[in-house]
C-alpha cells in the first residue's frame, strides 16, 4: 500500500465509512484503518430498524457491508490493522499501525466506544464463559435458559427484549426506580411475560461453577438485603467508554473521555476531526455517526484545499 494519503480515517463504523464515501467522492486519497471488521458496533446488531431507507429494517452486518462497498466503489481503501500511536503535531500527520506507518494531511477519528464493565473481580475471567456484552452476538447460546441483564437504558432494554424471545427467564437488574430509554422499548419490556425487572438493585458478585456463570449475588438498595439469582448467562449493558486513549495527550476531552467537538466535528487540533460515539453529543446512533462522517469529510476537504 501507499504510505501517503490526503485523509486517514481511524475506525470503520458508520461514521468512518460515511466519511470515507464523502472524502473519496471529493477526489481525496482516502484510507480507512479498522482493527476488526467493517461496521464496528453496528455489525454486531442483529437488526437495524431506525435507519432511513429500509422499511423492513436491515441486518447490522449487511448495512456495514453496504457502507464499506459504497466507499470503496469511489476509491477509498481499507486496511485491517491496529493503530498503536498517532502523531497529531507533525505535518504531515503520522499514524503508526501493526501493518506499517502512514502519513496524511488530515485525520478523521471514528473509533467509537467500548462496553463499560461492572468492575467486579472475576468479570474478565467469565467473559465468554457465560458473561457477555452483546445479546445479539451471544444470545443463541442461552436458548431456554435463565439470564440476567444489568442496566437501565436503551441498550439494556434492547438486550432484555432480544433475549426474551430465546430465554426462559430474563432478570433485568437496574439500580434506580425507573428505566431511562425509549417509551416503545419500556412498553415492550413490560409486555414481555418472561422479563422480570428488579428495581433499586445492584450486583455485588458474579457467581461461577467450574469457570462458568451460575448466578449473581444482588443487593436491594432500599434495605441492603442480599439474594442470589440463579442464571446461566449475564449480559452487561451499563453504557460505553469512548476509545480515545490514543488521543488523550493531544485532544481536549470532557470528564468522561469524550473528545470535545461540536457539530462541525472539529477538534482543538487543526486538521483533526471527531465523529460518532467518541465525541461529545446528545445522541449516539448510527444515523448521527453517519451525519458526523459527512460533515467531517467536508471540513477535512476544506482544510486540505486551504492549506
Image (cartoon, rainbow, N blue to C red):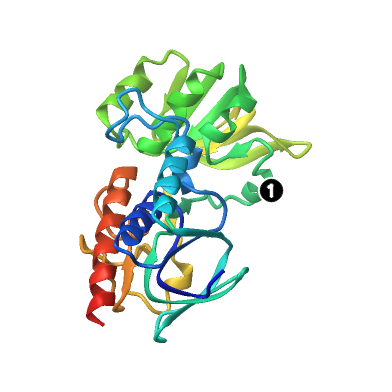
Looking at the image, residue 212 sits to the left or right of residue 299; the answer is: right
Q: Can you give x and y, in whole percent of width and height, for residue 41 in the image? A: 46, 45
Using the image, determine if residue 63 lies above or below residue 30: above
Q: Residue at x 53, y 41 (%)?
A: 133
Looking at the rendered image, the quarter that the N terminus falls into is bottom right
Looking at the rendered image, the quarter that the C terminus falls into is bottom left
The quadrant where residue 151 appears: top left
The quadrant where residue 286 appears: top left
Badge 1 density bin: few <14, some 14–19, many ≥20, Cα 10 Å: few
Q: Residue furthest top?
A: 193
Q: Can you give x and y, in whole percent of width and height, for residue 127 in the image? A: 64, 44
Nearest the eye: 63 or 153: 63
The residue where tag 1 is placed is 125
Q: Residue at x 43, y 29 (%)?
A: 47
Can residue 151 be seen in this snapshot? yes
Looking at the image, residue 285 sits to the left or right of residue 129; the answer is: left
Q: Can you give x and y, in whole percent of width and height, for residue 70 in the image? A: 39, 47
Amino acid at each position: 500500500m501507499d504510505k501517503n494519503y490526503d485523509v486517514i480515517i481511524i475506525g470503520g463504523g458508520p461514521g468512518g465509512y460515511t466519511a470515507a464515501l464523502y472524502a473519496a467522492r471529493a477526489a481525496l486519497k482516502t484510507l480507512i484503518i479498522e482493527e476488526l471488521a467493517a461496521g464496528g458496533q453496528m455489525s454486531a446488531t442483529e437488526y437495524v430498524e431506525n435507519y432511513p431507507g429500509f422499511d423492513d429494517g436491515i441486518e447490522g452486518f449487511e448495512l456495514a457491508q453496504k457502507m464499506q462497498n459504497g466507499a470503496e466503489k469511489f476509491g477509498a481503501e481499507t486496511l485491517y490493522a491496529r493503530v498503536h500511536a498517532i502523531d497529531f503535531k507533525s505535518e504531515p500527520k503520522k499514524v503508526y499501525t501493526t501493518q506499517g506507518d502512514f502519513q496524511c494531511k488530515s485525520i478523521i477519528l471514528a473509533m467509537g466506544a467500548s462496553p463499560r464493565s461492572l468492575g467486579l473481580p472475576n468479570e474478565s475471567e467469565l467473559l465468554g464463559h457465560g458473561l457477555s456484552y452483546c445479546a445479539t452476538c451471544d444470545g443463541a447460546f442461552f436458548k431456554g435458559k435463565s439470564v440476567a441483564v444489568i442496566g437501565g437504558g436503551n441498550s439494556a432494554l434492547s438486550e432484555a427484549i432480544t433475549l426474551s424471545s430465546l430465554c426462559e427467564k430474563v432478570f433485568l437488574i437496574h439500580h434506580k426506580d425507573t428505566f431511562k430509554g425509549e417509551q416503545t422499548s419500556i412498553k415492550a419490556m413490560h409486555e414481555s411475560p418472561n422479563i422480570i425487572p428488579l428495581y433499586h438493585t445492584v450486583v455485588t458478585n458474579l457467581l461461577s461453577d467450574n469457570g462458568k456463570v451460575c448466578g449473581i449475588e444482588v443487593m436491594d438498595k432500599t434495605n441492603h438485603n442480599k439474594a442470589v439469582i440463579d442464571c446461566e448467562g449475564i449480559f452487561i449493558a451499563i453504557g460505553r467508554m469512548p476509545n480515545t486513549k490514543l488521543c488523550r495527550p493531544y485532544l481536549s476531552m470532557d470528564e468522561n473521555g469524550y473528545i470535545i467537538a461540536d457539530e462541525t466535528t472539529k477538534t482543538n487540533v487543526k486538521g483533526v476531526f471527531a465523529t460518532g460515539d467518541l465525541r461529545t453529543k446528545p445522541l449516539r446512533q448510527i444515523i448521527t455517526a453517519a451525519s458526523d462522517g459527512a460533515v467531517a469529510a467536508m471540513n477535512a476537504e476544506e482544510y486540505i484545499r486551504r492549506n
